[in-house]
Amino acid sequence: MFIKQAFDEFLDLEYERVDRKTVKVRLPVKPLYRNSVGVVHGGIISSLADVAMCNTIEPDENNQQKVVTVDLNVSFLKGGTGDYLVAHAQVVKEGRTLAHAECQIFNDQDVMVAKASAVLFNVHGT
């Protein structure tokens, strides 16, 4: 199960659960997502990473989001080009209230364009 929100639907994200703590999220690149240089805007890439990492933690029994991001770090390695981007995200460590996640984002040529890490707060763990 994945968290589905209006913003995610706007981006047309496609989800795949690889295992219990690993997901892939695919973003079809639209002209709207490109900046004036012609590459995918960093905010879109950051959103893709954030959505992917938050979906590594499965939703609660009511299909509600269990975590929110309290710290997000994104490093851009190469301009985001191509027809789609894919985020590979996994939980590194999960505690009662905090989880640490990492994400790598690749273009349609399997070239890494960004990497990210996040600290996620479990809103039900308090």
Image: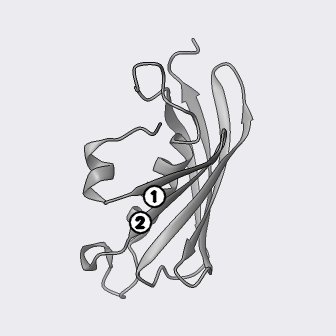
Give the percent coordinates (x, y) of residue 108: 52, 80
Which of the two residues, 60 or 18, is positioned nearer the viewer here?
A: 18
Q: Which mark is residue 60?
A: none
At horizontal 46% and vertical 63% (from top left) the residue drawn is: 26
Q: Is 104 drawn above or below residue 109 in the view shown?
A: above
Disc 1 vs disc 2: which is toward the camera? 2
Q: Residues within 10 Å of mark 1 (few under 14, many from 20)?
A: many
Query: What's the colour scheme?
Result: one colour
Give the percent coordinates (x, y) of residue 42: 43, 68
Specify which label sits upstream in the sequence, 1 or 2.
Answer: 2
Circle count: 2
What type is the residue that disc 1 sits on? Answer: Leu
Question: In the displayed image of the protein, which residue is found farthest to the bottom?
Answer: 37
| Element assignment for label 2 | strand
Give the left or right position of residue 22, taking residue 61 as reference. right
What type is the residue that disc 2 sits on? Answer: Leu
Badges 1 and 2: C-beta atoms under 8 Å apart? yes
Q: Which mark is residue 48?
A: 1
Q: Quadrant of residue 121?
A: top right
Q: Is 1 drawn above or below residue 84 in the view shown?
A: above
Q: Quadrant of the C terminus?
A: top right
Q: Quadrant of residue 84?
A: bottom left
At horizontal 52% and vertical 50% (from top left) the residue drawn is: 52
Q: Which mark is residue 27?
A: 2
Give the percent coordinates (x, y) of residue 46: 47, 59
At horizontal 52% and vertical 67% (from top left) the residue drawn is: 86
Q: Residues within 10 Å of mark 2 (few under 14, many from 20)?
A: many
Q: Residues under labels 1 and 2: Cα distance?
A: 7 Å
Give the left or right position of residue 58, taking residue 14 as reference. right
Give the percent coordinates (x, y) of residue 109: 57, 85
| Element assignment for label 1 | helix
Which of the two residues, 85 or 18, is positioned nearer the viewer here?
A: 18
